Amino acid sequence: MSNGISLPGPHNITRVELENGIVVLVYENDAAQSVVIGGSLAAGSLYETPAQSGLAALTASALMRGTHSRDFNAIHTALEDIGADLDVGAGVHQTSFSGKALAEDLPTLIELLADVLRHPAFPQAPVERLRGEILTGLQYRQQDTRYRANRAFQEALYPDSHPYHYSSRGTLDTLPLLTTADLAQFHTRHYGPRGMVITIVGAVQAADAVSIVRQHLSDWRNPDQPPVPALPALRPPQETRRVSVPIPGKTQSDIVMGTIGPARKAEDYRAAALVNSVLGQFGMMGRIGDEVREKQGLAYYAYSGIEGGHGPGPWSVNAGVNPANVDKAVNSILHEIERIITEPVSAEDLSDNQSYFTGHLPLQLESNEGLAASIMHMETYQLGLDNLLLFRNRIMALTQEDLLAAARNYLNPQALIIAVAGPEA
Amino acid sequence: MAGVTRHQLSNGLTVLLKEQHNAPLISWWVMYRIGSRNERTGQTGISHWVEHMMFKGTEQFPGSVLDKLISREGGSWNAMTSMDYTVYYETMPADQIDLGLRLEADRMVNARFTEAEVESERTVIISERQGAENSPLFWLSEEVRAAAFRVHGYHHEIIGDMADLETMTRDDLYNHYRRHYMPNNAIAVAVGDFQTEAMLKRIEELYGSIPAGDAPKLFARPEPEQAGERRVIVERPHSTAFLEIAYHVPASSHDDWFKLAILNSVLTGPSGMGGGSIDNKTSRLYKALVETELTADVDGGLMASIDPYLYDLVATIRPGRTHEEVEAALDEQINLVRNENISQQELDKAKKQARALFAYSTERVSSQAYWLAFAENFDRYTWFENYVSRLEAVTVEDVREVAQRYLRPQNRTVGWFVPLAGDGDEDMDDMEDEE
């Protein structure tokens, strides 16, 4: 117990590994009338070639367009009639799913999930329609300054030999070329029980929930699932490079600047997360928010974030500013990055941020979604189900020197990618 | 949602309390009965700007300190300005909520509004508006609202017009604050892990001595009935076309509003009460517009509001399709619900969806507190408690009746966003590389 909250841990999370490898995690929460599911499979854009960029994502989105026993309308009628929701989507490392229903409808939700994961039909016409919707959305994004700045940043930061270079959504060029046969083939090869995790949180009995999952998924086999490919080695930028994306008709510029950050399993991940909080999170967006927004009034938003997961995701600063203030904002951010790698954070900064990280847990864990996300996080990155129980001590053990070392390990104000999307200068 | 108690302090502050003991959290909300609907030309956006200034702090709690105090305890705090209200909240570990209580009592009267801070925030707010302007739907909805409301304050965006953001003064902002921030113009709500009696006592200690002010005279001009369709066109550089159709509908305290909520569910899928929305792929307009490949999506918006506002339908038009085609397909569906009853099965589905969405959106203490304040602001908090049962009472005949009454061409504004071709489709190839 900490702060009077019963944290999820090995004592109250039911964890069962089915005979085919699927890991089922259940956390009972009677406070709500609903149930939430979340989970993932080992099938992301990591497993596609650049020429087929978007294949994993289109496959995942197409699952709900029809199965061998249910057409598009039958799937969605079954869900919407009971006010339930189910989404499947692919990122770089994984295909993830999430769903929600009134607790009494969990059996329906799991049955539908199992059907779309195991027996998709990829029907031609509904998949074409889906493709058109995605392309319309992607065309829209070409005009979106935040999206374009992020893409330009990511493409400049990771070489084209690395999966993080590409958007898992695919591109306007690659998506039209993917056939339903490609989708079916990707599904046959990559979807399977090995590496699959499903978490269930809500007003359900753990034993019932496990037995529902077992009923629909325990006989699933796919001996052909390939091993997880290793990520190519990476070199962070050696000098600063600016990239600009002009988009006519815009009144604001979006800035994304940064470098390669830690993977979730990196030794100094927690120290990096904490020093990132000092830099661009704590309170109203840390030192960067204080400088760029509060003191100089340059931006409505300015913050920093680390995105490390299975691999080294970016450590970046994001800000939206008037086009005339881009250089001023960039210089202020550079100044704060310089400061964070030069001076240790103060004892007060350290203790404020430690207190924030540990004190925020009850809020983070209030809802079924929050609980499911935390449990998935522990399982996905193999942190141990006691991670939340140990969290407080691990955070409190970090020192000013740990934070300085973590900042120095990744950040260098002379070697960053700086991407700006906005009106033509 | 049982268990709410309502109190009124002698200075007029309305207090709603609801105990909930499943998590060691308390959410504390203070809502002022002032929003963009009450803003005059020349001061549009003033409520929102005042909300920003409230984070600059007071003598007792300077801005930078405030932020630290709350974050340190693992709390979350923020504020929102809407057409009908301005609201502030802190959600904190239960044993720390006193900070939130003290802070809101203090800034109800002691906010500073220094000249320098007003100027620095002016550019932040202009930047917020410019960020929104980067989206074509912002431009379209701004024009549709302005056309739909000629007289009523709902005609301008909450963020305000650029001309006013450039010219409003520190005194304008401060006077707005003094006129509207007072206990007798506020609703305070706590939901969470506390004992009602002790909580009420603490609220009285902190807020009871704040003097009541003169009840503010609200700038509120009723919109005359619209007689004839209005049309607006926005042309700007972009790649995507949009259609928005907005019908005048009654205030949310009106019975018809609930009938329209069911109608919206049938047409475009259920709207969540601000949490856990669900898909709409079996709704009528999805079938008529998206499945026919006219649009990439379609959405309906029915907001709860103090005064009669709008029910709007927004669609993203697929490349190669025209506004005319989409409008015609949409009109066909509108005529159907005006001329024939929806099926009992559609009605039952809409009700079950409403029950589920209501459950999803009331699981967190923060959302419960918000909805209680929200409902008290335009009706009574019981509006929220009775939400599901009022939807349950709607019949198929009711739905046709409101469709006939409100979804008339004479009662609507049609907006087209027409994308201007330019170097619109440039991809990475056109990217300049300035090493």
Image: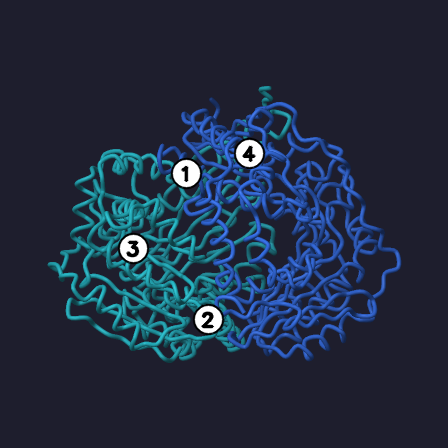
Give the Cα distance between marks 1 and 2.
Answer: 33 Å
Q: Are marks 3 and 1 on the same chain?
A: yes
Alpha-carbon distance for marks 4 and 1?
A: 17 Å
Chain A shade: blue
Mark 4 residue type? Ala
Question: Which lettered chain is shown in cyan?
Answer: B
Tell which circle, 3 or 1, labels the residue nearer the N-terminal end.
3
Residue at the disc numbered 4: A149
- Identify the secondary structure beneath mark 2: helix
Q: Quadrant of residue A122?
A: bottom right
Residues at discs 3 and 2 both on one chain: yes
The residue wearing badge 2 is: B358
Lower position in the chain sequence, tag 3 or tag 2: 3
> What kind of element bears circle 4?
helix
Q: Is residue B146 visible?
A: no
Crowd rating for badge 1 (residues with CA inside 10 Å; few <14, some 14–19, many 20+): some
Looking at the rendered image, the disc whose residue lies closer to the viewer, 4 or 1, is 4
Tell me where residue A379 appears, x and y as whole percent. Answer: 69, 60
Mark 3 lies on residue = B86
Nearest to N terminus: mark 1 or mark 2:
1
Q: Which quarter of the picture shows residue A392?
A: bottom right
